[in-house]
Amino acid sequence: MRIFLTIVVAALCAPALGQAGLPRTAIFYYPWYGSPARDGGYAHWSQSGHAPPFDIASNFYPARGAYSSSNPSVLQAQMREIARAGVGEVVSSWWGGGSAEDLRLPAVIGAAWAVGLQVAVHIEPYEGRTAASIGADIAHLRELGVTDFYVYRPGDIPAADWAALNGSLTGVRVFAQTNLAGFAAAGKFTGLYTYDVLLYGGGSFGRICAEAHKLNLVCAPSVGPGYQATAATGDIRVKPRLQGATYDAMWRAALGASADLVTITSYNEWGEGTQIEPASSRENGYETYDGTYGLAGKAAQRAYLMRTSYWTSQLAIR
């Protein structure tokens, strides 16, 4: 009962912010899902030959069904869930100007700001991406009020090119997805994050943050509940959720490593099975959250959001 009350109280707390209002937690968010009713067809749910709405490219099934990310009511509900979990920043996946993720970004920003969330952009490896193109992207995205940028696979571009770009920027933070603090420092990044919860477990966080701090980098290791992408990609590697124990272990490791910012992989990457968004407990053939933190059925659907509230409250008091 005491643990339950702690979680409930934490869920009512405002998002944890650090020095000068900077977020202490950020969560990776995917606005790329489509449905016939709103978008003319299914997007991402139908990956690898799946046939939505009941056969989707995920080992789990969302409690909201095979939704569209362009549905305002879905977007608003998702942002409310994230804010109530005590997360401070939404990092929205972005695949270049004119992409579906770019066109949906203003709506993401509006829904997030309405509930007090900050918004960052996850700059993905879109075709033709260079340091120069990212410089133009940042200039465009700053006009929308975005000042935090997370770069996935920064190693695709030489550190010297990053240094030239990052050295020219003011008023923004740019994070490199890497476990190599030396590369991030050479590229003049603000900090680093790991994203991949399969390759970078909690056991690596102490080393990563120690090396980052020595080089005056912000350390933002990524925690997540697990990984299971078999249905979407055929990847047979699995990081089991262990009824919440995996998520807890990664959070403990991040806090133990004195992380400056904890990033969460992910809110809704259903294809890779890293999501903490509510999952159905009723669809046959899919994994569920049943048993997580001792919960079952409908109560278990929100288990990871509730536990996130607990961990963000612990981070806030440090």
Image: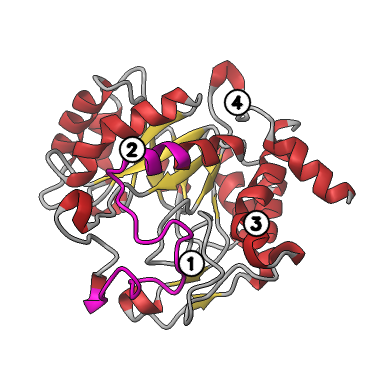
* CB within 8 Å, label 3 to label 4: no
Would you say the magenta stretch is mainly helix, strand or loop? loop
Comparing marks 3 and 4, which lies closer to the viewer? 3
Comparing marks 3 and 1, which lies closer to the viewer? 3
- The answer to whether one can see residue 105 in this image is yes
Q: Which residue is mark 4?
A: 17
Q: Which residue is mark 3?
A: 303
The residue sitting at 59% across, 46% down in the picture is 209
Q: Secondary structure at mark 3?
A: helix
Comparing marks 1 and 4, which lies closer to the viewer? 4
Dot 3 or dot 4: first in sequence order is: 4
- Where's residue 284, x and y in %? 48, 80
Most extreme residue toward the right is: 2
Crowd class of label 3 (few under 14; some 14 to 19; many from 20; radius 10 Å)? many
The residue sitting at 39% across, 30% down in the picture is 111
Inter-mark Cα distance, 3 to 2: 24 Å
14 vs 105, left or right, is right
Dot 1 or dot 4: first in sequence order is: 4
Q: Relative to 76, is 178 above or below? A: below
